[in-house]
Image (cartoon, rainbow, N blue to C red):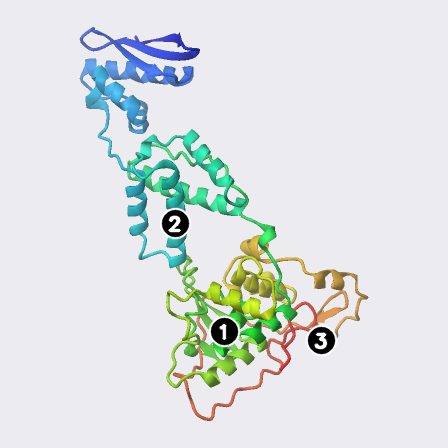
Amino acid sequence: MASIHKERRGGNVYYRLQFYDKDNRRRSMRLGTINKKSADTIRVRVEDLVSASIAGGSPNNETARWLAEIGDDVAQKLATAGFASYVPRRESATLGAFLESYIDSRKAGFAANTLRNLNYTKRAMTEFFGEQRDLRSISEGDADDWRHTLAEKYADATLNKHIKRARQFYKSAVRKGFAERNPFADVKGGSEQNESRQQFIDLETTGKVLESCPDVEWRAIVALARFGGVRTPSESLGLRWVDIDWENDRFTVTSPKTKKQGKPYRVVPLFPELRKILTEAFEQAEDGAEFVITRYRDRNANLRTHFLRILKRAGVTPWPKLFQNLRASRETELTNSFPLHVVTGWLGNTPAVANKHYLTTTDDHFRDAVAEPAKSSKTGGATVGAMVVQKPVLSASDTNCQQHPQLHHFPTKKAENVVFPSVSGLYLVPPRGVEPLLPD
């Protein structure tokens, strides 16, 4: 039988384990400043190891699982006490090398922005813990200390993302045998929602920005985000002229972000405000042009920096999340006129994400709520306050982003004598709550 002895030194409590091995020799293991419950667990497991060594067999399943999960410190003490043959071979890895290997192995499957964010968290971890820190040596207390340090630098939403990525890293480390536990599993994250960074960009502001754009391609970039709800730059730079179905007033958006979820593309209505600007861009594009945006495709081109210059020229104060808030403003408008599942199908997110990160309450919502009720429309429009919204009847194919429609494309730019069909009556934007056409 093994026994636990408690010792007090310098105001601290230490535990020591004593037992007799298979040769009836008295052995001792110093367990350190662990708690009584942990000391009792080690005692029970050591007793089973002694029994297994006497019988020349293997420890029971619970002890075998325990041996696979113990830290390096306890494993070393067991080996010194004569149980080296029962301690599984333990591979080790340093934090910096493991994170570098993890990110490199996923370069083919992750989008560029995802890899960039993983590298941000890698840097935050290695700066705090050190690149040469053994993965097994990082404890739950260390993880808490890291979280407190990040909380002094970042908003809750950013803090939460770093913690989630740290959990992701360690989940892989545990599966590969480089760690027995995930010290970030129970670390409290912050809220993913930061309402202070959500801002509705109204029509007046959008008009000023469009007027200050240096060329038609920048107007197209802004319009794709604000009127088409397209992600910038990943989706806007990927848009090709063959993706625009002028005849049926829709366009296909290739989406690297949702490709892994089995949704490599979605079909979006060619809203009148967007069609007007894309038509102008098409007319000015060079013959044979493939992409809608051609001048800003260089990876060194910083769209954010260019956009800030445009906002300054327009006399507009920059808003948080420059391009995402343009896209979010469009989603807020569209939900005034169409069911949320239809809007999220067009914009490529989910109702939960839209409600949490995109949709905002605008001044128009308050004005419509207190306006005098209008008479119900005989044509079946939805009446909200004084706003009567006429909703076009959509077929299943209009809202199903998984089924690629039979598109009618211009093969290349530029066909002669192209006559664009009228958009009258197609996806008209209601006069209240959703943007009207911009003035010429």
* Residue 293 screen position, x and y as percent: 43, 74
Mark-to-mark CA distance, 2 and 3: 52 Å
Find residue 382 and report its horizontal and vertical position in percent: 70, 68
Q: Residue most toward the right?
A: 372
Q: Quadrant of the C terminus?
A: bottom right
Q: Identify the residue position indicated by label 1 in the image.
A: 218
Q: Are marks 3 and 1 in contact (CB under 8 Å)?
A: no
Q: Which residue is mark 2?
A: 118
Mark 2 or mark 3, whichever is nearer to me? 2
Q: Residue 424 location in percent, x, y?
A: 61, 83
Q: Residue at x 60, y 75 (%)?
A: 427
Query: Toward which corner of the image does residue 7 lie, by quadrant?
Result: top left
Mark 3 or mark 1: whose residue is earlier in sequence: 1
Q: Is residue 146 visible?
A: yes
- Could you give the CA–CA distance between mark 3 and mark 1, rounded to whole angstroms? 39 Å
Q: Which mark is residue 383?
A: none
Say if 386 sits above or below 23 in the image. below
Density class for disc 3 (Cα within 10 Å; few <14, some 14-19, many ≥20) is few
Identified by mark 2, the residue type is Leu
User: Does dot 1 land on a helix, a strand or a loop?
Assistant: helix
Please say whether residue 232 is visible from this viewpoint: no
Question: The residue under label 1 is which amino acid type?
Answer: Trp
Which residue does the numbered mark 3 point to in the structure image? 379
- What is the C-alpha distance between the residues marked 1 and 2? 30 Å
